[in-house]
Amino acid sequence: MRFPMFVELEGKRVVVAGAGTIGTRRIRVLVEFGASVLVISPEVSGEVRDLWQSGKVQCELRTVEKQDMETAFLVVAAADKREINHQIYEWCSEAGIPVNVADKKEECSFYFPGIAKRGSLVAGVCAGGEDHRLARQAVEEIREFWKEKAGI
Ligand SMILES: C[C@@]1(CC(=O)O)c2cc3[nH]c(cc4nc(cc5[nH]c(cc(n2)[C@H]1CCC(=O)O)[C@@](C)(CC(=O)O)[C@@H]5CCC(=O)O)C(CC(=O)O)=C4CCC(=O)O)c(CCC(=O)O)c3CC(=O)O
Ligand SMILES: NC(=O)C1=CN([C@@H]2O[C@H](COP(=O)(O)OP(=O)(O)OC[C@H]3O[C@@H](n4cnc5c(N)ncnc54)[C@H](O)[C@@H]3O)[C@@H](O)[C@H]2O)C=CC1
């Protein structure tokens, strides 16, 4: 079972390769938690383009390369091609950089949890990589519970 670390991301460089549906979801959360996000992707979603235009992320519209990992505190591999994500995993493993690989849990040194926030409270829910639907359901229950409890 994985340990729920609560990591400081404020100002830390996070490199995200791939800015489609999943990459965009990751980028949204990382920006919300203060990370300095560098997006590398030949194409990006409209939402990421807006974040780029408003200066909330940096973007480079190209394929990801090994040197991109050099300055990263964390890396997210969210390309739609297994061989690209696997290559990123290899580069990060070599360099000792924590990596999230969207299409292969065995290659993830960290997972993205489902997140519930309320005031200073934050819950991250993970189902051990076995059942993301269960994680989602539990997060929704926590959100409802916190909404119903006055004063939180
Ligand atoms: C291990 C983990 C690693 C990580 O991604 O960090 C992982 C891995 C994988 N997910 C896959 C598929 C989907 N995951 C979702 C949804 C969520 N996945 C999330 C977390 C995690 N997913 C990590 C821990 C999970 C755990 O503890 O069980 C959540 C909690 C958080 C979030 O993603 O934000 C979020 C739910 C909360 C929410 O929605 O709020 C959907 C539905 C959707 O996208 O709407 C689908 C597609 C449709 C379907 O299958 O239902 C695949 C196969 C990809 C492929 O086929 O290639 C892999 C790869 C693999 O299992 O090897
Ligand atoms: N972990 C999770 O929760 C989930 C993971 N997935 C997996 O995540 C991956 C991404 O899925 P989607 O976002 O739906 O795909 P998508 O097709 O919407 O986006 C893929 C993105 O990768 C970019 N890309 C392609 N080649 C690249 C390269 N060489 N370098 C950098 N970027 C590159 C594309 O330009 C595009 O922006 C898939 O492998 C999918 O199976 C899917 C659902 C949930």
Image: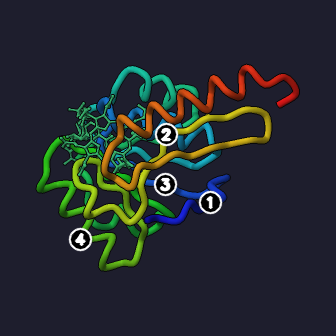
**Residues marked 1 and 4 touching at CB (< 8 Å):** no
Q: How far is mark 3 from mark 4, CA to CA?
A: 17 Å
The amino acid type found where label 3 is placed reads Val
- Disc 1 marks which residue? 7
Judged from the image, the secondary structure of the residue bearing numbered disc 4 is helix
Image point (49%, 54%), residue name: 14
Q: Indicate left or right for 75 with 140 as reference.
A: left
Q: How far is mark 1 from mark 3, CA to CA?
A: 12 Å
Judged from the image, the secondary structure of the residue bearing numbered disc 2 is strand
Image point (23%, 54%), residue name: 104
Q: Bin the neighbour count of mark 3 within 10 Å (Cα to Cα): few under 14, some 14-19, many 20 and up.
A: many
**Foreground: disc 4 or disc 2:** 2
The circle on residue 114 is 2
**Foreground: disc 2 or disc 3:** 2
Q: Bin the neighbour count of mark 4 within 10 Å (Cα to Cα): few under 14, some 14-19, many 20 and up.
A: some
Q: Is mark 2 within 8 Å of ligand 1?
A: yes
Q: Indicate left or right for 139 with 83 as reference.
A: right
Q: Indicate left or right for 36 with 108 as reference.
A: right
Q: How far is mark 1 from mark 4, CA to CA?
A: 23 Å
Q: Bin the neighbour count of mark 1 within 10 Å (Cα to Cα): few under 14, some 14-19, many 20 and up.
A: few
**Residues marked 1 and 3 touching at CB (< 8 Å):** no
Give how far across and how far down residue 102 sits, in percent.
29, 48
Q: Is mark 3 within 8 Å of ligand 1?
A: no
- Disc 3 marks which residue? 14
